[in-house]
Image: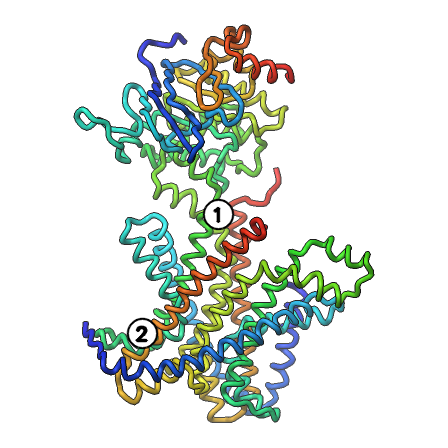
Amino acid sequence: MKPSNSPMLRFEKVSKRYGSLTVLDSLDFEVARNEKVAIIGPSGSGKTTLLRMLMTLEEIDDGVIYVEGEPLTHMSQGERLVRANRQHVSRVRAKIGMVFQHFNLFPHMSAVQNCIEAPVTVLGLSKDEAYARAADLLQMVGLGDKLDHYPSQLSGGQKQRVAIARALAMRPKIMLFDEVTSALDPELVGEVLKVIRQLGEDHDLTMLMVTHEMGFAKEFADRVCFFDAGKMVEQGTPQQIFGDPQHERSKQFLSAVLETR
Amino acid sequence: MMLEWDWNYTWEILPILGEASLVTIKATLLGFLLAAALGLVFALLRMSRVRYVRWIATAVIEFIRSTPLLIQIFFLYYVMPEFGLSLDAMTAGVIALGVHYACYCSEVYRAGLDNVPKGQWEAAIALNLSPFVTLRDIIIPQAIPPVVPALANYLVALFKETPLLSAIAVLELMQTAKILASESFQYTEPITLVGLYFLFFSLISAALSRQLEAWLSRRHGGTR
Amino acid sequence: MSPRFIIIVILSFLVGIALATFAEFRVFFPELLRGAWVTIQLTVCSALLAVVVALIAAVGKMYGPCWVRGLAVGYIEVFRGTSALVQLFWLFFVLPYFGVTLEPFAVGVAALGLNIGAYGAEVIRGAIKAVDKGQWEAATALNLSRMQTLRRIILPQAFLLMIPPWGNLFIELLKGTALVSMITLGDLAFKAQQLNQNTLRTVEIFSIVLIMYLCMAMVISALMRTLEQRASKGLMRGRAN
């Protein structure tokens, strides 16, 4: 999938602070359509915050995020940009889906119910349409026989796959993956990565992944971004970043991380 | 909506209500003293190694907690004389309040006692301290400070239930208000004033209790 | 709970049987039953009112616009800060001056329902807060609105958490119904006093009445336990992977 020209996502001087701590420092960042970006770095570097701000789970302190050219949490009023109202945010946010580190499945609903909830209540699909879509997606992630299972009856890897299906049911254009394998037993990581790889190959999706799985990032991502202390220190193709890191900090991080693998 | 507030009448009855409020406060404090002391006894009984003592204590506490305080007040006031123990209204009321709230306090003490690490008991045994001394000098001093806010809550709850004593004609706030109202046929002012009185003290105690909790959690580095 | 339960039940039956041998028992027991029926009706109606009011106040306090929040906080503080009896008397004696005259049963339901509802609002608030934040985040990621999230995702999970505290509140409510005897409503407590004055069988009457309240309280506890079991099955909680 060749990324096209106009950026799908654009962060323009985006900053986030917690009190005196600057988590993201005036970030300028672009993602092209259908590009697969891996975001790596030490904890506290701001990479998860980046994703959470994009999903409107955190407020932006400075700057603007553009999704397909449109500001996410702002609206144009003539020349100026003002805080967007709920309808605007909802409309733009609908293009983005997210999978969480701790799954966050709805425990009182079965796998298929988890997947039809939002399509029915937000998109207005009929129960049958939503069910058909959910069944397809769950089949695609390898859980076609577990439609009526509840989260408490599923393994971590299965739960994460349901979470992926649930996010896909809303037909987003952008998928965010926040360390989605970090909470899994090592032997369950593979099945989730396999699904993500398949997703990238078969569908037109822009994907942002915060991950510690360097091997996966190396072979799957189009671009790798290294974050540290709230700034994007270095970015490039996997070959560039993993093979020949330029920045001192990147070299430090990668040698420490890759040594243990 | 006929909102006629008779200010003259209000000033007239304020001193009378003020005096009655002293009776309310007296009943509250005496009742709570009994509740706090008896509650600790109940809590210790429930920890007894003798099964039957435990069971009976638990049964009695459950019984008292599950039945209305009003009936318990009547029981003490009307039934005790049959067994030769004639109590005046105030005493009967205070005892009823005290015993009823002792049951709630015992739960609070139990939680506090449970929270003291087992290691404390073990160290005391290793030092050959008797159970009584252990409880008195080691366990109870550690168990009580964290639960003081919870006890304070029950003090306020007890305070708010003192109007029940009006049922056996104790001349506390509610009873006095009723008497004033029935004499003057003006109900709005007395009863509203009583309500405001309780509301005022309740809000103050809520604020104080929040302060107390904040202070305590700073001292104990955040309890649990 | 079991050994304790058994002791209470056995003691109750023993006392019951002993008292049943008194001739007058057969005369005043039906009267007490009538009072108990009023108590039960009061409890059920007030409970319904309390739950509805608590839900509205809790959601209003947490998510409403400024003025709704103010009303909710005001309601909760006033009804928690004053005792049920004061509220009962106020509604019974003072409300008529505002042109609203309710019959004693309605006054009882209103006072008790509003009183317990104020405590219930805090219980509901606590339960909603206790639901894992990740659920809200997943719902936001799926673009669910706040009300949709609350209704479909959060409240069903909060429901299970609220059952034990609500059980305690319902028992408080049951005990509170005794207060209506002071506005001459013919509940169990009222009948107890009445019969006491007429027959002077003080010990028997009040003992039986206490046991009757205890039985009603145990029924409430049992109902809440069943509700909790049913609800947790629906949530499939506590099942290991």
Same-chain check, marks 2 and 1: yes
- At horizontal 66% and vertical 69% (from top left) the residue drawn is C6
Which of the image's four quarters has the C terminus of chain A?
top right
Image quadrant of residue A134? top left
How far apart marks 2 and 1 lie (CA) works out to 35 Å
Residue A128 in view here: no
Residue B45's place in the image compared with B23, above or below, is above
Q: Which residue is mark 1?
A: C130
For mark 1, name the chain.
C
Residue A39's place in the image compared with A3, above or below, is below
- At horizontal 44% and vertical 15% (from top left) the residue drawn is A36
Q: Position of residue B193 (x, y in %)?
A: 32, 75
On screen, residue B100 versus residue B21, left or right, reads right
For mark 2, name the chain.
C
Indicate the amino acid at tag 1: Ala
**Closer to the camera in the image, B59 or A133:** B59
Indicate the amino acid at tag 2: Leu
- Disc 2 is placed on an element classified as helix
Q: Position of residue C207 (x, y in %)?
A: 57, 82
Rendered image coloring scheme: rainbow
Are there few (<14), some (14-19), or many (20+) residues within 10 Å of tag 2? many
Which of the image's four quarters has the N terminus of chain A?
top left
Residue C151's place in the image compared with C25, above or below, is above
